[in-house]
Image (spheres, rainbow, N blue to C red):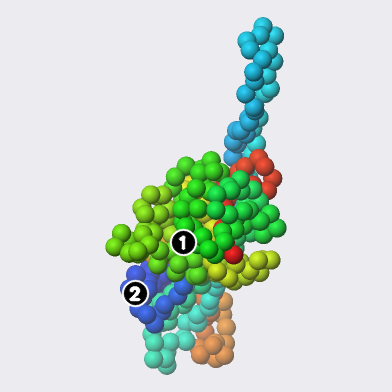
Amino acid sequence: MANRTTANLVKAQVKLLGAFQSSELRFRNPATYLALKAMSALMFPNYQQLRVREDRTIETNYAKKGTRSLGTGGRIHNHTGTHGDTAVLTPTWVTYDDKFAMSLKQADNSLYNAQEQMNQEVTDIITNFMEGYETLATAYLFNNRSGVNVATYNGTFDATDDVFEIAVANETLAVQTTEIAIDANKYPKGAVVFCDSISYGKFLYQKNQGGGNNANLSYQFDMNGLTFVHSIGLGALAAGLVSAYSKGFWLVVPNGTVATLPWIPVQNRVGVSTKENEYTNILNPIDGESYAVHSYETRVDGTSVNGYTQDVLSQYQFSQDISFAKAPLTTSTETPILAFGIV
């Protein structure tokens, strides 16, 4: 089992820390995914202990809000009231994986030794996961934008696209308008704004128009507790809507209302080695999470993979279960993800 020892993975992991500082191994920064991950502890602090295996369902109970108009009938002896209610949120996990194979003899006549080749394979695994998760996170936010937005200041809500539209004539007040819309929808201060490239560029420009300029726009960025994230994939998604939003599109998530929930099996967490398989894990230096690693060996003629006739092929699969979850709301089309666009 010399070609699939845990030590090889550990050495590869050490190399990762320096590898991602190299421009040669550049990849899209998973800014959207990492921003959602930062909120996760607020929503499900102990889900790792509750989900002991892939087939175990976790249910989270929450109280429904009882919204009623105030009465004016005065104090009476036979008043009757309604009962409060609760509901259940059930997160759903999906297993994502990536894999590679290495033969025992593939490095014998190569410029790169076996450890260097292992390092590169693991590097590719990590970048594939991060770019994949960024795409998934962006799509989740976009596809779960709210169908309800009660704001009216400086714009109107388009119920077809589920986007609060701000006229281009008012785009210099877009951040102020967004902050007022968050308040109108009864969310507290503090939110993450996921921007397409156009809106992100405009907001950067506006942020730097300070008191020394004819038009002081920077005050909008000092008053509202908003964090801006460049979500590159949002532009292409917004372009598919009826209004296309080519002048700027962004999504607002109040702090702590959307989360990512990564998980791996207990065997991978503790490490289990059998005659046929090995279960271990590796730490991703980008998101700080552990990813499950499963490996096994087979006898092969490795000539087709740069090995040789009497060879051993080691198969590696890296995996992680992940769930994207949002704070539940009782109105069927309402979510805490508010969409905005300039028209």
* Percent x, y of residue 154: 55, 53
Q: Nearer the viewer, residue 25 or 141?
A: 141
> Which residue is rendered at x = 40% and y = 67% of the image?
205
Q: Residue at x 41, y 79 (%)?
A: 25
* Residue placed most toward the observer, 158 or 256: 158
Q: Is residue 283 visible?
A: no
Q: Quadrant of the C terminus?
A: bottom right
Q: Position of residue 127 (x, y in %)?
A: 47, 72
Q: Are marks 2 and 1 in contact (CB under 8 Å)?
A: no
| Number of marks drawn | 2
Residue assigned mark 1: 172
Q: Which x, y percent locates residue 86?
A: 64, 32
- Of circles 2 and 1, the one toward us is 1
Q: For residue 114, which quarter of the picture?
A: bottom left
Instruction: Relative to 88, say whether 81 is above or below.
Output: above
> Considering only vertical position in the picture, is 207 above or below 187?
below
**Position of residue 92 measured from the top left corner of the image (x, y, whole percent):** 62, 52
Residue type, label 2: Gln
Q: Is residue 198 visible?
A: yes
Residue type at tag 1: Thr
Residue, x 50% and y 53% (percent of image)?
Answer: 177
Question: In the picture provided, is 274 more to the left or to the right than 88?
Answer: left
Bin the neighbour count of mark 1 within 10 Å (Cα to Cα): few under 14, some 14-19, many 20 and up: some
From the image, tell me which residue sits under label 2: 21
**Sequence order check: which comes first, mark 2 or mark 1?**
2
